Image: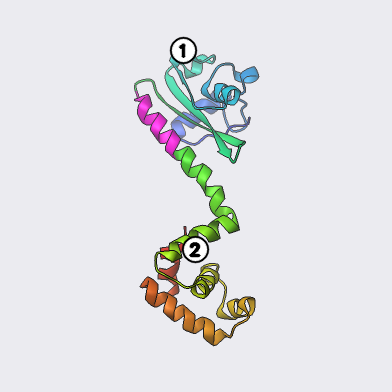
Amino acid sequence: MAVEFTGPANIVNKLESVNVGKGTSFALEHAGINAISLSMQLDTLVAVKGLEHSLTFFSKWSCMCSPIKIGNQIRGYLNLSVSLTENLCFVASLLKRLISDIESRPMLADPMSKKVLIYEHFDLFSLTNREKEIGFGWLQNQSTLQISLALGISEATVRHTLKKVYSKTKCHDRGGFIKKFMV
């Protein structure tokens, strides 16, 4: 498991001075006991404090790591390392929230999932099926011509329907419409 570090420059520089940097393996066989290696072994959120680390360099830190799962597949790990004096309950809450946010994003990258979410949002404004189709195309940055060709209707119908969509959603322009509906 290769690592990429982000944090204050002085800490990143200190890590690099002891050969810990981007690309370093924290797997159990390479770095001994640490939050990343244990999370990799146990497939769950793990905390390692101070002298529990195999590498003495980390003896003044508490580290928490959790796998990032998309579906049932682990796609990576997120580790937060803090001073031993920090509250681990806060770190655990923050880490869980970050993981949740990361794991929910791929769903939005899937076109069908994204469409379902946007259509559900459209339902709050009582849009008809045709208004949803046109509104979704508009959100996908399609022109009125592209939407009309895809739906087999005239450009005039698309423009007229967009006016109705704007009225129902209380939007005045494409920018406002996109802000309101892009998830």
Q: Is residue 91 above or below residue 140?
A: above
SS for callout 1: helix
Horizontal side, residue 46 vs residue 24: left or right: left
Residue carrying label 2: 119
Q: Position of residue 168 (x, y in %)?
A: 38, 74
The nearer-to-camera label among 2 and 1 is: 2
For the point 56% across and 79% down, the residue is 144
Q: Can residue 8 be seen in this view?
A: no
Q: What residue type is labelled 2?
A: Tyr
Q: Is residue 1 above or below residue 99?
A: above
Q: Distance between the residues labelled 2 and 1?
A: 52 Å
Q: Residue 2: give its label.
A: none
Find the magenta span and give its range: 86-97
**Residue 143, quarter of the rendered image:** bottom right
Residue carrying label 1: 51
For the point 53% across and 59% down, the residue is 116
Q: 44 or 5, which is in the foreground?
A: 44
**Residue 171, quarter of the rendered image:** bottom left
Q: Which amino acid does label 1 sit on?
A: Leu
Q: Can residue 85 be seen in this view?
A: yes
Q: Is residue 183 above or below residue 84?
A: below
**Magenta-colored segment: predominant secondary structure:** helix
Q: In which quarter of the image is the N terminus?
A: top right
Q: Is residue 136 above or below residue 94?
A: below
